[in-house]
Image (tube, rainbow, N blue to C red):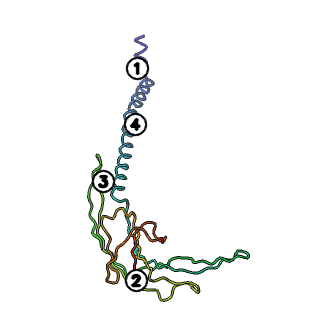
Amino acid sequence: MLQGMRKWSGSPLSKLAITLFIGLLLLIPLAAIKDLMREREYRRDEAKTEVINQWGGWQHIAGPVLAVPVEEEYTEHYGDKTEVGILRHYLYILPESLTMEGDIQSQIRQKGIFDIELYSGLFTVNGTFRKPENPLWNMEQGKILWEDTRLILGLGDVKGLSQDVDLIWNDSPLKFQGGTSGTEIFPVGISAAAPF
């Protein structure tokens, strides 16, 4: 029997079987390492999301845009009934000139074993707006409400504002408020009354 084992252990088939067996055994720690890497990536992403949500989310600045309310009367006929109402929509005016300056600072926040880079910034936006000479549509039964104009600034996440946003409009200080005042130009942002 000993002689049979010596013949088997020296054969190429036995060497292949042993090599395959060792290779399969090495797959166990390799799978454990890959599993650990996936878990660490998941934990890193989870920590990053948690810190970003506390800090204020991803940011972008869009605008500024003037939103001028427009009210138009309409008449609908339904058989022998007539409905009269007012439809409110907005005329959006982009700035004639716009400059934006910013100072962005980065900082590292730690969450567990992970370092997460965050940014904060202070921005100054200057622009000029001009009242359009001729609105682009025919308004026989409506009016433009210039006195109800709002200046809208789109943001990625209002929660990311760490201080009030100041506005100087025609040499007068005004305050921004959260929300875009019912306009649909930006899903999230801030707005201020800016009579035009």
How many residues crowd mark 4 within 10 Å: few (<14), some (14–19), many (20+)? few
Task: Please tell me whether residue 159 is drawn above or below residue 132 in the rendered image.
Answer: above
Verify CB contact (< 8 Å) between mark 1 and mark 3: no
Q: Residue furthest top?
A: 1
Marks 1 and 4 sit apart, C-alpha to C-alpha, by 30 Å
Verify CB contact (< 8 Å) between mark 2 and mark 3: no
Marks 2 and 3 sit apart, C-alpha to C-alpha, by 40 Å
* Element on which disc 1 rests: helix
Verify CB contact (< 8 Å) between mark 2 and mark 4: no
Q: Amino acid at mark 1?
A: Ser
Marks 2 and 4 sit apart, C-alpha to C-alpha, by 62 Å
* Element on which disc 2 rests: loop
Q: Amino acid at mark 4?
A: Ala
**Which of the pair 97/142 is nearer the observer?**
142
User: Along the polypeptide, which appears first: circle 2 or circle 4?
Assistant: 4
Q: Amino acid at mark 3?
A: Ile
* Element on which disc 4 rests: helix
Q: Which residue is labeled 4 in the image?
A: 31
Q: Which mark is residue 116?
A: 3
User: Along the polypeptide, which appears first: circle 4 or circle 3?
Assistant: 4
Marks 1 and 3 sit apart, C-alpha to C-alpha, by 56 Å
User: Along the polypeptide, which appears first: circle 1 or circle 3?
Assistant: 1
* Element on which disc 3 rests: strand
Q: Which residue is labeled 2 in the image?
A: 129
Q: Which residue is labeled 1 in the image?
A: 9
How many residues crowd mark 1 within 10 Å: few (<14), some (14–19), many (20+)? some
User: Along the polypeptide, which appears first: circle 2 or circle 3?
Assistant: 3
- Of badges 1 and 3, the one in the foreground is 3
What residue is at 50 percent from the left and 77 percent from the top?
90
